[in-house]
Image: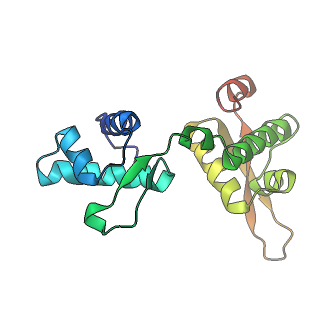
Amino acid sequence: MSSKATNTGLASRIRAWARARRTAFTMADVCTALGARTPEERQKVFDSFAIFRSRGEIEKTSMKQKRRQKYQYNSSWEQQKSGPEAAQKQKICKAMRLISFHEPFSASDVKKMTGATRSYTDKVTKKLLSQGYITRVGFRTLEDGCGSKEALYRVVNNDRFRLEVIK
């Protein structure tokens, strides 16, 4: 979702309704329960529902035709949120803080230290940069013979970083 999306409470209403439901339900059941009558309202419910499905928070229960597809809330979903990806992010953030005590770091330094993929390391770095937890302090020339450069970063405030990012 974009940062410009308004918080309407639709997701929390869907979640609460689905959790309370003990039997399987259809998309029509969800729309009826939430009072979505117009095509625009129903589309918003469908879009939110698709996000729930992609996260695994709501799962299919039968293989019937699409219009009558049955779903069920996955109560173990909350336990899955703190899975391997969350652990990997914590590892990356701890490495950033550790390296930053001594010298500026690059995404490739963090990748080497944690064993994470470069794309995931870049994703975490960009997010922390946009949130103001780290800052770009310069560039370093790579020794690949092409004259390429990579950005160097530093943690802005180690205490704030430890308290807010490394939980």
Q: Residue at x 59, y 36 (%)?
A: 132
> What residue is at 27 percent from the left and 53 percent from the top?
27
Q: Is residue 79 left or right of residue 90?
A: left
Q: Establish if 66 lies above or below 155.
A: below
Q: Furthest residue to the left? A: 38
* Depth check, front residue: 89 or 136: 89
Location of the C terminus by quadrant is top right
Q: Position of residue 15 (x, y in %)?
A: 38, 37
Q: Residue furthest front?
A: 23
Residue at the image point whose x is 80% and y is 47% from the top: 105
Residue 54: percent from the left, percent from the top? 47, 56
State the residue in front, 10 or 104. 10
Q: Look at the image and tell me whether residue 1 can be seen.
A: no
Q: How many marks?
A: 0
| Quarter of image, res 13 | top left
The residue lying furthest to the bottom in this view is 145
In this rendering, position of residue 140 left or right of residue 38? right
In the figure, 100 relative to 71: above or below? above
Side of 2 where 134 appears, left or right: right
Question: Could you say which is closer to the camera, residue 124 or residue 7?
Answer: 7
Side (left or right) of 9 relative to 35: right
**Res. 92 in view:** yes
Location of residue 32 in the rendering, given as x and y in whole percent from the top left corner? 18, 44
Please say which color scheme the image uses.
Answer: rainbow
Question: In the rendered image, which quarter is residue 99 located in?
Answer: top right
- Give the image location of residue 66, x and y in percent: 30, 67
Q: What residue do we see at 65% from left, 40% from top?
A: 82
